[in-house]
Amino acid sequence: MYNTKAYSAASATSPLTSDTIARRDPTEHDVQIEILFCGICHSDVHSVRNEWSGFMPSVYPIVPGHEIVGRVTKVGSAVTKYKPGDLAGVGCMVDSDRTCPNCQAGLEQFCPNMTLTYNFPDKHLGGVTYGGYSDSIVVEERFVLRVPENLDLAGVAPLLCAGITTYSPLRHWGVTEGKKVGVVGLGGLGHMGVKFAHALGAHVVVFTTSPDKKEDALRLGADEVVVSRNTDEMQKHAGSFDFILDTVSAKHDINAYIDLLRLDGNITLVGAPEKPLDVAAFSLIMARRSLSGSSIGGIPETQEMLDFCGKHNITADVEVIPIQQVNEAYERLLKSDVKYRFCIDMASLKSA
Ligand code: NAP
Ligand code: ZN
């Protein structure tokens, strides 16, 4: 065991502050990584504030962070894919049982024995896992991702959650050239959804509550932008979408979007609001529409997404901050005021 610096919250109402946590020494299959950048996901805010208490109660102190990019510092004797000095990424998961049908299909995110990167029982040290708002992390090789060398590292970190969470459902629902695709909410996930849907050749429409994001949405790859509070603008798109990706982090009227789907169209929720959404049965029934959800993505697909980003030069648009500004960043996230992902430069933790 060794100690490493981190930022943690002591309770659902406490700010994040400087702390020291223990990590395990790398075992034979482990990779030890010095963390260079860690993105701030809205899930970090939900978790720190215990907003998902019914589903996933938070354990304190909590060290969030699951958009991790860094350099390998040490590897165990059985590790074959990484060596010290390599770039490496870690996303939302650090373990699973590897034997269940979902793991065997490369869908570790649906493994009943999956371990999340933070706030999940830690099989090695007891207590719970600690995330990426820290100097260093130790992760089994299978859950470490190769990072393309040609991309800006601060912009790569958010790919490990915001990237895969949007890439996976777009691929699953067959988004290609000629499809009309909506992205609801232009935050961390939403802006990656726009970039991927555009790169896959779709006609992309962004739905936003923030009129001042219009120009950015077009720059990011949208073909059209709709201010969702304007019902006339919404109505113009009724019954026309093949697929809509809903990334909204708070309770909202999902029926307004279901009505925009064409026959057999699908809307997928990746946003995970604290409170349940109301669904009008008739909105689904009348055009055989479907509503589904999607959770991050498996390890093979996460690697595929990173390689796709390397090939197409795709990264997140980031506001890089020192860790000392993390509490302020959370407040701004709650006001939909981020362009379009906060990313912590972990070098700042050395002076914390
Ligand atoms: P974010 O950066 O805060 O973006 C959310 C966006 O939703 C905001 O920028 C805003 O966009 C819109 N929005 C916020 N409040 C709204 C409201 N009351 N009504 C309508 N629109 C609203 O958050 P994020 O990091 O992208 O995460 C989004 C959600 O996905 C969170 O709930 C997060 O926990 C969840 N998530 C799920 C997965 C998964 O595997 N399924 C993975 C990661 C995150 P506009 O300003 O454009 O309206
Ligand atoms: Zn996330």
Image (spheres, helix red, strand yellow):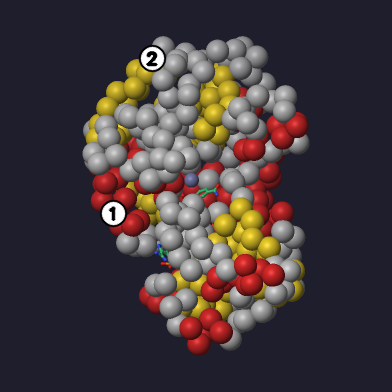
Quick one: quadrant of the N terminus? top left
**Front residue (pair 183, 314):** 183
* Amino acid type, callout 2: Tyr
Quick one: quadrant of the C terminus? top left
Q: Please tell me which residue is depicted at 42% across the width and 43% down the height of the picture.
A: 52
Residue 286 position within the rendered picture, expressed as x and y whole percent measured from the top left: 70, 74
Q: Please tell me which residue is depicted at 68% across the width and 63% down the height of the picture.
A: 290
User: Where 204 falls versus 113 (above or below)?
Assistant: below
Q: Residues within 10 Å of mark 2 (few under 14, many from 20)?
A: few
Which quadrant holds residue 181? bottom right
Q: Please tell me which residue is depicted at 67% across the width and 21% down the height of the picture.
A: 80
Q: Of tags 2 and 1, which is closer to the observer?
A: 1
Q: Residues within 10 Å of mark 1 (few under 14, many from 20)?
A: few
Q: Is mark 1 within 8 Å of ligand 1?
A: no
Q: Earlier in the sequence, mark 2 or mark 1?
A: 2
Give SS at disc 2. Answer: strand
Can the viewer see residue 310?
A: no
Q: Is residue 38 left or right of residue 173?
A: left
The residue beneath circle 1 is: 331
Alpha-carbon span between mark 2 and mark 1: 33 Å
User: Label for residue 2?
Assistant: 2
Q: Is residue 270 left or right of residue 21?
A: right
Give SS at disc 1. Answer: helix
| Cβ atoms under marks 2 and 1 closer than 8 Å | no
User: Where 239 falls versus 330 (above or below)?
Assistant: below
